[in-house]
Image (tube, rainbow, N blue to C red):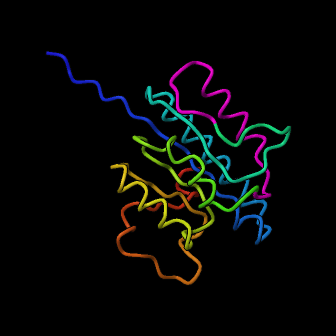
Amino acid sequence: MCEPFVHEKRMLLIDVDQYHHLGTETAFEEMIAAAASLAVFFAGRGNSLGLVTNARIDGQKSPYVPISRSVETLPALLETLARITMTPQQNFTQTCRQYVTALQGANCMVCAWFIDENKPYIRELAASKNNHVQYFVSEMDEDGTLDPRLFDAVELIEAVCV
């Protein structure tokens, strides 16, 4: 008997705001490495991948890689990750609103310094579009308190970069 095939769409959302403001270059590089690891892992599982970031991209490249499962997607996504700078082009919420249609039907993987006031917007967006959101953060949060509704959806970036 054949098992049903479940094709997943995954969107990497990269927020550089706090890395820029705090000047945490090492943590920023670890986050980029974790995002690349996630992309390679999920591409290897046959998932469609895409990327959206609020970062300025070296070489005037787009901050958006559309969700796709083509053979060109992973190299394009990894190249974009390699060109991401710590300088934000706009705030994270504006970026997500700009690409809201690209997020529809995708499981979102948010990579950021911590969950700040912009991240609940992503959770609300996901709930309205019936998406799942997983957060990968460098620090759990700014003041040591984390919304209990997010406990099952937050992992430290250091857990991804083993």
Q: Nearer the viewer, residue 79 or 156?
A: 79
Residue 82 lies, with reference to residue 143, above or below; the image says above
Please indicate, yes or no, whether residue 162 appears anywhere in the rendered image.
Answer: no
**Residue 2 sits in quarter:** top left
Left or right, 35 with reference to 109: right
**Farthest-out residue, top:** 1
Residue 147 lies, with reference to residue 152, above or below; the image says below
Q: Residue at x 47, y 67 (%)?
A: 120
**Horizontal and vertical percent for residue 45?**
43, 29
Q: Residue at x 57, y 46 (%)?
A: 99
**Horizontal and vertical percent for residue 85?**
79, 51
Residue 22 lies, with reference to residue 3, above or below; the image says below
Residue 151 lies, with reference to residue 96, above or below; the image says below
Question: Split into 4 quadrants, where in the image is the N terminus?
Answer: top left
Q: Residue at x 55, y 45 (%)?
A: 12
**Farthest-out residue, right:** 59
Please indicate, yes or no, whether residue 96 appears anywhere in the rendered image.
Answer: yes
Q: Nearer the viewer, residue 87 or 47?
A: 87
Q: Nearer the viewer, residue 47 or 92?
A: 92
Residue range in magenta is 65-88
**Horizontal and vertical percent for residue 65?**
63, 35
